[in-house]
Image (spheres, rainbow, N blue to C red):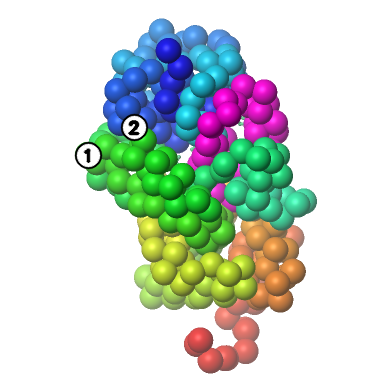
C-alpha cells in the first residue's frame, strides 16, 4: 500500500512532522533520510536521538534512506534546509506520482537565485502542485503534542485545504491560505530577525530594545511583503508576526541562539540557523524591489564577519529619524 504522506528529510522538523502525519492519517509514513546508517539506527531505536531526542516515533513511521518509498504518496513533505531544496526536489522528481503535491517545509531564501521556497519548487518541479508549510512551531513542542497552529499555503485553495486536512490532529492545526508568497516571506524573514533579536539580548541592550527590534523588524518584513504583493493579514498572521514573536523571544530558537552567541561574543552554536544563510539573499531580494531592510542588512554583515556587533548597533542607532509608517 502506498503512503498518503511521505517526509523527505529526517531532521528535527521532519521527524516531528512524520509523527504528526502518522497520527493524522493512521497509515504508514516513510521518513526518508540520506544517511543509511543513521536511518537504520532510528528504525531500530524508534527515536531520532541526534535531532529530536526523547521523542518516540509513532509506530506507523517508517525510517528509511530509500526515496522510492515515497512512490504513490499524495503529499510529499520536503523538510531539509532551504539551500538544499532545489537538489532534493530534483532527487524526488522521478518518484512522484501523477497526483503528488510537494509541500516545502523550510524557511529561507535561496542564495544566488534569491528565490523563496515556493518559487524554487515551481522551477525544479514544473507541473507538480507545490505548497508551503510555515508558522510558529518548534519541532519539540509539536512532537510532544503541545497545541500548535501553522499555515498551509498553496496557490490552489483546494490543494491547501487537502494538505491541511491530511496533517491535522487534535493538537496540530494547519490553517489554509492561498497567499504563498506572503507565507514564504514571513518564514524567511523571521529567521533573520530572530538572529537580530538574539544579538539584542546577548549584547544586553534591554527589554525595551527587544520590543523595538520586533516592531521595527516587522516593519521591514511588511515593507518587502507589500512589494511582493503579500496580503497584510498574512504578514500579521501565524507565518509572519506569529513566527517572528516565537523565534525572537525564545532561546529554543536556533536563530535566536546564534544571535545570542554573537551578541555575547561567544562561539557560534553548531546547529542549523537558516537565517544566517538567508540574510544576504533576503537583503538582495529587498534591494531588487527598492525596499530598505536595515536590521536584516546588519545581520547579513555580522554573520558574514564584515561588521562587528558594536558597529551594527552604532549604525542602526545613527540612522536618521523618520516617520514610523
Ligand atoms: N526545527 C524546528 O523547530 C523547525 C524547523 N523548520 C524548518 O525546517 C527546515 C529543516 O530544519 P530542521 O529539521 O529543524 O533541521 P535539522 O538540522 O534538524 O535537520 C536537517 C535535515 O536535513 C538533512 N539534509 C541536509 N541537507 C540535505 C540534502 N542535501 N539532502 C537531503 N537531506 C539533507 C540533514 O541530514 C538533516 O537530517 C529548516 O528550513 C527550518 O527552518 C520549520 C519549523 C520548525
Ligand atoms: O521555525 C521555527 C519555529 O517556528 C524554528 O526556529 P529555529 O529554526 O530558529 O529554531
Element on which disc 2 rests: helix
Is 117 displayed left or right of 12 in the figure?
right
Element on which disc 1 rests: loop
Judging by the rendered image, the residue that carries numbered circle 2 is 20
Nearest to N terminus: mark 2 or mark 1: 2
Q: Is residue 308 above or below residue 70?
A: below
Quadrant of the rendering where the N terminus is positioned: top left
Write the start and end of the magenta stretch as one range. 80-108
Residue 255 coordinates in the image, percent (x, y) = 51, 50
Q: Residue at x 71, y 44 (%)?
A: 123
Q: Is residue 230 above or below residue 98?
A: below
Residue 164 coordinates in the image, percent (x, y) = 37, 43
Q: Residue at x 43, y 47 (%)?
A: 158
Residue 288 coordinates in the image, percent (x, y) = 74, 69
Judging by the rendered image, the residue that carries numbered circle 1 is 170
Q: Is residue 32 above or below residue 184?
A: above
Whether pointer 2 and pointer 1 mark residues with C-beta atoms closer than 8 Å, the reply is no
Q: How many marks?
A: 2
Q: Is residue 136 above or below residue 227?
A: above
- Could you tell me if residue 11 is visible in this image? no
Amino acid at each position: 500500500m502506498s503512503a498518503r504522506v511521505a517526509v523527505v528529510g529526517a531532521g528535527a522538523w521532519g521527524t516531528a512532522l512524520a509523527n504528526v502525519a502518522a497520527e493524522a492519517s493512521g497509515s504508514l509514513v516513510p521518513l526518508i533520510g540520506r544517511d543509511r546508517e543513521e536511518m537504520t539506527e532510528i528504525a531500530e531505536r524508534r527515536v531520532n536521538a541526534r535531532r529530536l531526542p526523547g521523542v518516540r516515533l509513532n509506530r506507523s513511521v517508517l525510517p528509511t534512506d530509500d526515496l522510492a518509498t515515497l512512490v504513490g504518496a499524495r503529499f510529499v513533505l520536503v523538510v531539509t534546509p532551504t539551500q538544499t531544496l532545489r537538489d532534493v526536489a530534483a532527487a524526488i522528481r522521478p518518484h512522484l506520482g501523477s497526483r503528488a503535491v510537494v509541500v516545502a517545509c523550510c524557511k529561507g531564501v535561496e542564495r544566488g537565485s534569491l528565490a523563496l521556497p515556493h518559487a524554487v519548487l515551481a522551477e525544479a518541479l514544473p507541473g507538480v502542485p507545490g505548497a508551503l508549510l510555515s508558522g510558529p512551531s518548534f519541532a519539540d513542542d509539536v512532537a510532544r503534542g503541545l497545541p500548535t497552529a501553522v499555515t498551509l499555503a498553496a496557490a490552489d485553495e483546494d490543494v491547501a485545504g487537502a494538505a491541511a486536512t491530511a496533517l491535522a490532529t487534535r493538537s496540530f492545526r494547519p490553517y489554509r491560505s492561498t497567499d504563498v508568497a506572503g507565507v514564504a516571506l514571513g518564514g524567511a524573514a523571521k529567521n533573520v530577525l530572530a538572529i537580530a533579536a538574539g544579538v539584542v539580548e546577548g549584547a544586553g541592550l534591554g527589554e525595551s530594545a527587544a520590543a523595538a527590534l520586533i516592531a521595527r523588524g516587522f516593519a521591514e518584513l511588511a515593507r518587502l511583503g507589500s512589494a511582493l504583493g503579500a496580503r497584510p493579514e498574512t504578514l500579521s498572521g501565524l507565518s509572519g508576526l506569529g513566527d517572528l514573536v516565537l523565534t525572537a523571544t525564545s532561546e529554543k530558537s536556533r536563530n535566536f541562539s546564534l544571535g545570542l552567541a554573537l551578541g555575547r561574543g561567544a562561539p557560534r552554536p553548531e546547529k542549523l540557523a537558516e537565517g544566517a544563510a538567508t540574510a544576504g539573499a533576503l537583503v538582495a531580494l529587498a534591494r531588487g524591489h527598492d525596499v530598505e531592510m536595515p536590521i536584516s542588512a546588519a545581520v547579513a554583515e555580522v554573520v558574514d564577519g564584515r561588521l562587528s556587533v558594536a558597529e551594527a548597533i552604532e549604525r542602526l542607532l545613527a540612522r536618521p529619524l523618520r516617520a514610523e509608517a
